[in-house]
């Protein structure tokens, strides 16, 4: 492959599987499963994607995901994501799903996990993508509920690699979830959390200090606290940045005002991710392409972002070395 056709090989570390449901899939699955949605046509559904903030997006996301009923639905969702992601250069994906989104409407997590694992297990041979699975908990639900769900997953030996924390951030600080994260870490699970997306820099600091997370999802608002930034640089705390998400959820006005260049200049340990690609205008490659064009990123910067994504992943040393080798190939192809 030459430079014009080879995608930058990356690890995608911030991806909500429910956020990969494309409008066509949503309407098809609704019809197949007899789920009534407030919208019946593609045009009607597509007209709802103009978000004013995080909550306005979450309202649509949570309504649409109700079409997921069977293991087959979860498998198809995951396989569709892997296909799209691999076509855009993703070589390893650490994907998440929202436990309460399914449990609270009566879908057992066994159904969810059976479908997702079927696709992830086939992902390496079908699409050349390795993967890890993160269970995310809704921070606007009681922490005790999350603890109970996680304990159930642990007791049933569920194949999960880590936990995360997502949904509405403001008003639901990390301090509420200390027990959940203690439980996860005591069972050897990896730990990440959304922080500093709509919430304050303090949520980033508290996620590190109280939850002892290994990565921060988003983290943009850490930039409001110079001492915290210095600490994150010194401790090499990974941040999974999602540029198109930030624009569509209006945490920033326009891509031109995205703090990515500042993050790079300060030496923050950032990678580029898609968050909810079906809702925000593109998969990981579209996010990389958008910031590359917007900020005229050079090859050395793209290489850095790709290597960061690998180093911030939960792959073992051999898995990381393999992906760094692919990035070496990309560099040689330029
Ligand atoms: N759930 C899905 N995407 C999310 C995001 N960007 N922030 C919080 N919760 C989410
Ligand atoms: Zn997210």
Image (tube, rainbow, N blue to C red):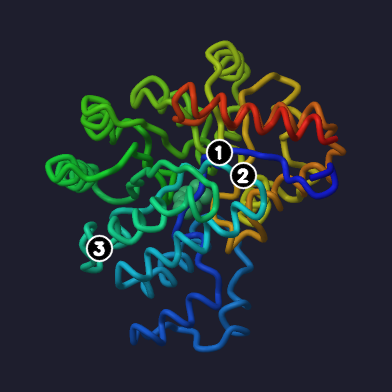
Which residue is at a point 82% across and 31% down the rendered structure image?
299
Residue 166 at what x, y percent from top left? 41, 46
Residue 327 at what x, y percent from top left? 69, 31
Q: State the residue lying farthest toward the left.
A: 155
Q: Is 226 on the left-hand or right-hand side of 79?
A: right
Name the residue beneath numbered marker 3. Answer: 111
Label 1–label 2 contact, CB within 8 A: yes
Foreground mark, 1 or 3, reads 3
Residue 60 at what x, y percent from top left? 48, 68
Q: Is mark 2 within 8 Å of ligand 2?
A: yes
- N-terminal of the pair, mark 2 or mark 3, is 3
Name the residue beneath numbered marker 2. Answer: 242
Camera-side residue: 117 or 221? Answer: 117
Residue 22 at what x, y percent from top left? 55, 70
Q: Is 218 on the left-hand or right-hand side of 187?
A: right
Which residue is at a point 41% across and 34% down the rendered structure image?
192
- The dot on residue 218 is 1
Which residue is at a point 36% across and 31% down the rendered structure image?
191
Q: What distance separates the C-alpha of mark 1 from that of mark 2?
A: 7 Å
Mark 1, Cα crowd under 10 Å, few <14 / some 14-19 / many 20+, is many
- N-terminal of the pair, mark 1 or mark 3, is 3
Q: What distance separates the C-alpha of mark 1 from that of mark 3?
A: 29 Å
- The dot on residue 127 is none
Q: Is mark 1 within 8 Å of ligand 2?
A: yes
Q: How many marks?
A: 3
Q: What quarter of the picture does the C terminus occupy?
A: top right
Q: Is 205 on the left-hand or right-hand side of 218?
A: left
Label 1–label 3 contact, CB within 8 A: no
């Amino acid at each position: 492959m030459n430079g014009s056709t080879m995608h930058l090989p990356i690890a995608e570390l911030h991806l909500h599987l429910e956020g990969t449901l494309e409008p066509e899939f949503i309407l098809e699955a609704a019809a197949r499963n007899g789920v009534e949605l407030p919208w019946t046509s593609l045009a009607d559904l597509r007209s709802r994607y103009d978000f004013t903030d995080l909550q306005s997006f979450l309202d649509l996301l949570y309504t649409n995901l109700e079409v997921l009923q069977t293991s087959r639905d979860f498998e198809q969702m995951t396989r569709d994501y892997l296909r799209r992601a691999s076509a855009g250069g993703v070589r390893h994906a650490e994907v998440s799903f929202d436990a309460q989104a399914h449990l609270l409407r009566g879908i057992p997590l066994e159904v969810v996990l059976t479908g997702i694992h079927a696709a992830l297990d086939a992902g390496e041979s079908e699409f050349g993508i390795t993967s890890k699975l993160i269970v995310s908990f809704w921070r606007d639900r009681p922490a005790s509920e999350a603890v109970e769900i996680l304990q159930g997953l642990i007791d049933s030996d569920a194949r999960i690699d880590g936990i995360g924390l997502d949904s509405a951030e403001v008003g639901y600080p990390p301090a509420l979830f200390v027990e959940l994260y203690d439980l996860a870490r005591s069972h050897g699970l990896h730990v990440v959390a959304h922080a500093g997306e709509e919430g304050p820099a303090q949520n980033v600091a508290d996620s590190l200090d109280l939850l002892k997370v290994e990565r921060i999802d988003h983290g943009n608002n850490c930039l409001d606290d110079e001492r915290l930034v210095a600490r994150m640089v010194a401790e090499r705390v990974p941040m999974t940045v999602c540029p198109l998400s930030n624009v569509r959820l209006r945490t920033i006005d326009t891509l031109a005002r995205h703090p990515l260049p500042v993050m790079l200049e300060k030496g923050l340990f950032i990678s580029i991710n898609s968050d909810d690609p079906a809702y925000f205008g593109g998969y990981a490659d579209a996010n990389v392409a958008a910031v590359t064009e917007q900020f005229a990123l050079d090859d050395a910067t793209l290489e850095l972002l790709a290597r960061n994504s690998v180093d911030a992943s939960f792959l073992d040393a051999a898995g990381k070395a393999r992906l760094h080798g692919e990035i070496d190939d990309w560099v040689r192809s330029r």
